[in-house]
Image (cartoon, rainbow, N blue to C red):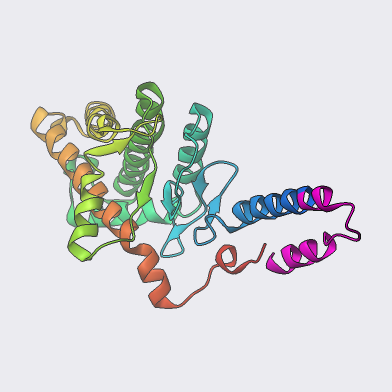
Amino acid sequence: MALFASAACAQQQPSSANQPQTTTAQGSAQKQSNTADQDKTGSNTNTPADSTSGTSKDRLFYTLPNFLTLENSGQVPPLTTKQKFGVVARGSFDYVEIPWYGFLAGLSQAENSEPGYGQGAQGYGKRYGAAAADGTIENFMTGAILPSLLKEDPRFYQSSSGGFLHRTGYAVSRIFVTRTDRGTEEFNFSEIFGSAISASISTYSYHPHADKTLANTASVWGTQIGYDTIVIVVKEFWPDIRRMIGHKRPDETATP
């Protein structure tokens, strides 16, 4: 881009003493055009982000969807309701979720959690369905439904500044504080109440009858908040881990 700017300036040198004002205006316009091009191509080059949707194409450990995390994003426009539902659906029904829920169901069966499901293939199938439903319902509640109703931004803006404790504290705080679509900050109603609603729906609908208690609902709610907290801390440090591993993603190495 600098070469284009230099060439443009050289072409705009006055050919005669009778045209200084015209040449200066043309050079100024060319400089502004080049600056605008640099702003368009130079911003957000460190983030595998989709500039058309304001979301990310990144994956945690190159597998798990991380589409609502933005790195070095600066100012980005708010997501529309359609975009919020679209990105949550893209992550919730990603192909990686199939073996992931299978792993969670196997772990649950090995521990014989919620024994009302039983054992064997039938028990495993019920656990698999419950794990998939739990994850999908919470994803939509915390990332699409409530954020759309409350005008909250479901994205996580990775910090990358400060020490380990500072960044960890920042990540944990995002469970309780979030951006609004106006760009201000407020209590994260979508996360706290969205996870509570999803815990209530799952507990009192398709989980075993013996587990349909207020105490179990509160336990599931707390587990979901704890899990989301761990995940968001991992999201904060994932770019550092990625650089440490030394892999370069195609999005990051591509030149404009």
Residue situated in front as seen by the camera: 186 or 146: 186
Looking at the image, residue 9 sits to the left or right of residue 49; the answer is: right
Q: Position of residue 175 (x, y in %)?
A: 24, 42
* Residue 12 located within the stretch drawn in magenta: yes
Q: Position of residue 135 (x, y in %)?
A: 34, 41
Residue 57 in the image: above or below residue 83: below
Quarter of the picture containing the C terminus is bottom right
- The answer to which quarter of the image holds residue 52 is top right
- The answer to which quarter of the image holds residue 209 is top left
Residue stretch rendered in magenta on the structure: 1-24
Q: Position of residue 121 (x, y in %)?
A: 34, 50
Residue situated in front as seen by the camera: 236 or 77: 77
* Residue 177 located within the stretch drawn in magenta: no
Identify the residue at image location x=72%, y=51%.
Answer: 28
Residue situated in front as seen by the camera: 1 or 238: 1
Identify the residue at image location x=33%, y=33%.
Answer: 184
Residue 43 in the image: above or below residue 85: below
Residue 40 in the image: above or below residue 146: below
Looking at the image, residue 18 sits to the left or right of residue 208; the answer is: right
Identify the residue at image location x=38%, y=25%.
Answer: 151
Residue farthest along the left direction in this orientation: 215
Residue situated in front as seen by the camera: 198 or 32: 32
Looking at the image, residue 181 sits to the left or right of residue 17; the answer is: left
Q: Main secondary structure of the magenta part?
A: helix
Residue farthest along the front direction in this orientation: 17
Q: Position of residue 50 (x, y in %)?
A: 56, 49
- The answer to which quarter of the image holds residue 215 is top left
Quarter of the picture containing the N terminus is bottom right
Residue 144 in the image: above or below residue 253: above
